[in-house]
Image (cartoon, rainbow, N blue to C red):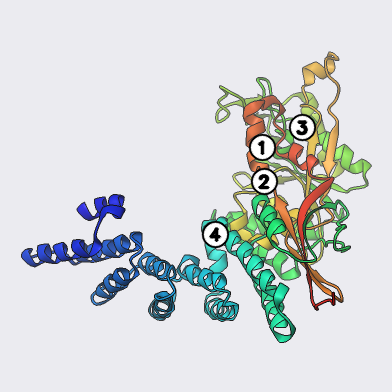
Amino acid sequence: RKMEMMLKFKDQVDVDQVHRDLLLILAKVDRVPPSVRQKIHELLVSLACSNHNAEAAIRFLEAVKETWTPSESAYASVIRVCCERADTAKHALNLLDDFIVNNPNRLRLRTVQPLLYAFMHSRELRSFVDLWKCVLRSHPDLIKSAANSSIEPVEQLFVDVIKAFSEEIGSAEGSEMRFLMENLDEILIEMSETLLSISEKSANFLSSNVLHESCNIVNISSDGHCPISGKRLKLFSLTSSQRALVRTGLFELASGQGVQSREAMLSFLDWMRGTPEDFSVVVDGPNVAYSKQNFDTGCFSYHQIDLVVQQLREEGERVLVLLPFKYVQPVIPNHARHQGYNFSTAQHVVTPEETEIVERWNAEGCLKISPYGSNDDWYWMLSTVVDDIESVRVVTNDQMRDHRLALLDPRPFLRWKTTKIIRFDFSHAWETDKIVNGTIDVPRVTLIQPPLVSPEIQRSTDDEHLIWHFPIRSNVTEAEEEDREYHANPTEAACASTTLIRKTEEERWLCLKLALKKTSR
């Protein structure tokens, strides 16, 4: 406990004197538990690193190794402090080799990152490439694992790699230039499998610090045209194997609820494949029905679903409405959210007019009911990957925060979400009494079709340039804006659709254009 307190006053502590005092204390104590000895030595390592004392940190780490296997955090701390000085940097590489040999499954990005930065700062980019390839070859999921904890260190490394390599490319020639270009390209390809966009801060930094023919923030039009590179960005869809992976993931989720749940999902898949209707769009009924119903008399609105169905049909779509079993009963739950409302027990008695809407859908063959107790989200997600070819899209404003990790890695999940989701908005909520007495009009429906460009890092080339386009994410995410709008005015909460409408015109990207050959001046 005293040592832990010392870490709070590390600048006032002589770590070597602390070590000597500890040795005297330990010599007088008969029975010191091994776990306590290990903790003491690891705290000595931390104290030495906090004081930027590389020699002491190395010495204490070696003392730990005599009896125990040091933790990854202890290695990472010593490697970091060794990289701060040129005369101890060589020890960092030896420590990393030692850690990888003895702890092959415990390597983290933070363990190797100080060495990567040391090589970048000293412009030893060949050593950087060697280390990068060695580590990534033996630990291919290193970047992905780091991003799952926090995307910021991954993005910072990404930005610093671009800056370091671009500066050297600017002065290199011949084989050296080709080496730098090829390896920068490979590193960006590898990192962009996990990092899908960059922040405004990163974009501003790169546009100000990378001196090349072009590294500029640009507005990409809705059809994907870049005014700087002249390239038209692409829309990427899921591959057949990725669609199969989504199906497998959904069946695994259903299996967690029991055999009956999995069989029901398989039955739905067979029905979708065998139905002669050939639906082009599935409507996520509850998501549409509850949109903007966050007021005192708000409830599940069959009328709002019907408005979306009619709008889709006017646009030539073949529509299937998906409803959970509980919403085709005479009395249904009311999960409309507003202040002071207990939606866990609230109910809504379905009116004759609402019953007529449901019966009409059923008669038209455009209604499918998910079984009692099942997760209806899984069904509309499955409907988008019924076959190994492009299939239906879904009308929903669901942000799908609960489903991504169970189904796909970030990039293919983004591609699925980008190509399969039709967002929607209503001018205002459906309120039957006010519409009947003429106080308000029937709501207008806005459908936001999937974009023509995939909002992910994209690579292209022409005869003279290597071109990268990086989408810039705003400081406020769709989810944050949805929450902010809800708390500001629950009645007008738009389930993120307001944000999406604002995003349909133009998107801000960073365009990096690197010359493949030196041009004569």
- x and y, in percent, of residue 255 in the image: 57, 58
As measured in the structure, the alpha-carbon distance from the residue carrying label 2 to the one carrying label 4 is: 25 Å
Q: Sequence-wise, which precedes: disc 4 or disc 3?
A: 4
Q: Which of the pair 268/1 is nearer the observer? A: 1
Q: Amino acid at mark 3?
A: Tyr
Q: Secondary structure at mark 1?
A: helix
Q: Sequence-wise, which precedes: disc 1 or disc 4?
A: 4
As measured in the structure, the alpha-carbon distance from the residue carrying label 3 to the one carrying label 2 is: 22 Å
Left or right for 349, reference 501 = left
Front: mark 3 or 1: 1
- x and y, in percent, of residue 478 in the image: 68, 43
Mark 1 touches mark 2? (CB < 8 Å): yes
Front: mark 1 or 2: 1
Q: Amino acid at mark 4?
A: Pro
Category of crowding for the residue at label 1, using alpha-carbon neighbours closer than 10 angstroms: few (below 14), some (14–19), many (at least 20)? many
Mark 1 touches mark 4? (CB < 8 Å): no
Residue 358 in view: no
> Badge 3 is on which residue?
302
Front: mark 2 or 4: 4
Q: From what the image shows, is residue 225 above or below residue 428?
A: below
Category of crowding for the residue at label 2, using alpha-carbon neighbours closer than 10 angstroms: few (below 14), some (14–19), many (at least 20)? some
> Badge 4 is on which residue?
153
Q: Which of the pair 269/115 is nearer the observer? A: 115
> Badge 1 is on which residue?
482
Q: Sequence-wise, which precedes: disc 3 or disc 2?
A: 3
Q: Quadrant of residue 485?
A: top right
Q: Secondary structure at mark 4?
A: helix
